[in-house]
Image (tube, helix red, strand yellow):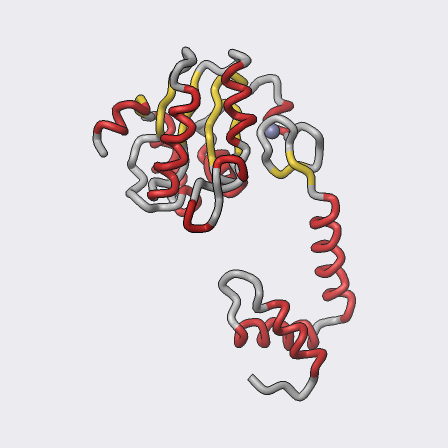
């Protein structure tokens, strides 16, 4: 792509670093911004900068939060002994949308993926294992997507906590293999949580 302006080219290059945004889309977005009032671009830039600099993670569940403890962890009506293990904030939002779950979450921040160089230490697995050790968890629900990375991560965590007397379950697979949680419709996902099955029986079906 040949540009008549270095300024335009830089902006397009930065924009096209985002996932799913190719050079053409980036150019369309940048040209759109040029047609809008300057303040619009300033608002966008400052909200991104502010988010990046001030973002905070809940001290308990590691979800993105503006406060030390997120609203879910700070809510006394939620069952803190029931913990749902998810990959990131999108899964928390998807499950919250079902209105079927009243427990806490534990946000891993990703899945174990040796291909991408992501090991257990890069995720919040150590703090989850610590939580289990303190005896404050009654049931752990694995709700990672059913991909090879998701299954590997579930199994790794399961092995770490197997010897502690807690119930481990996994969401029922109304969600087909490989599906991401965030794409499941609310009714299907809600049912998958209500009809969760013991984690051990999900291993036998592999
Ligand atoms: Zn939290």
Q: Nearer the viewer, residue 39 or 159?
A: 159
Left or right of 119? Residue 195 is left
Relative depth, front residue between 130 and 24: 130
Q: Where is residue 103 in the image (x, y as percent from the top left)?
A: 50, 23
Give above or below for 46 relative to 154. below
Location of residue 135 with respect to 149 vertically, above or below: above
Instruction: Identify the residue at the far left of this view.
Output: 205
Ligand 1 falls in quadrant: top right
Residue 44: percent from left, percent from top: 71, 60
Residue 69 can be seen in this image: yes
Q: Is residue 180 left or right of residue 91?
A: left
Most foreground residue, 9 or 46: 9
Report the label total: 0
Q: Residue at point 48% right, 44% down?
A: 118
Q: Which of the 4 quarters of the picture holds residue 160?
A: top left
Q: Residue at x 76, y 63 (%)?
A: 42
Q: Which quadrant does the N terminus fall into? A: bottom right
Q: Nearer the viewer, residue 128 or 197?
A: 128
For residue 7, which quarter of the picture?
bottom right
Q: Position of residue 14 (x, y in %)?
A: 63, 68
Query: Where's the C terminus, which quadrant?
Result: top left
Say if residue 97 shows up in the picture. Answer: no
What's the residue at 73%, 65% (across, down)? 40
Q: Where does residue 52 sit, x and y in percent of width and height?
A: 70, 50
Q: In this view, does 91 lie to the left or right of 179?
A: right
Residue at the (46%, 30%) spot, across then down = 85
Q: Is 64 left or right of 95, judged from the image as shown?
A: right
């Amino acid at each position: 792509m040949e540009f008549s302006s270095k300024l335009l080219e830089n902006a397009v290059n930065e924009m096209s670093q985002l996932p799913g945004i190719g050079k053409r889309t980036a150019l369309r977005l940048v040209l759109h911004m040029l047609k809008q009032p300057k303040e619009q671009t300033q608002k966008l830039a400052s909200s991104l900068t502010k988010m990046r600099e001030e973002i905070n993670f809940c001290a308990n569940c590691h979800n993105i939060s503006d406060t030390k403890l997120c609203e879910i962890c700070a809510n006394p009506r939620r069952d803190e002994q029931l913990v749902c293990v998810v990959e990131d904030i999108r899964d928390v939002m998807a499950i919250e949308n079902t209105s079927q779950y009243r427990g806490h979450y534990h946000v891993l921040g990703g899945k174990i993926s040796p291909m991408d160089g992501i090991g257990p230490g890069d995720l919040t697995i150590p703090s989850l294992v610590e939580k289990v050790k303190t005896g404050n968890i009654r049931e752990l629900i694995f709700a990672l997507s059913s991909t090879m990375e998701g299954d590997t991560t579930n199994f790794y965590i399961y092995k770490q906590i197997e010897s502690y007397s807690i119930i481990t379950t996994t969401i029922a697979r109304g969600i087909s293999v490989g599906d991401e949680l965030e794409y499941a419709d609310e009714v299907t996902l809600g049912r998958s949580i209500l009809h969760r099955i013991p984690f051990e029986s999900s291993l036998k079906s592999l």
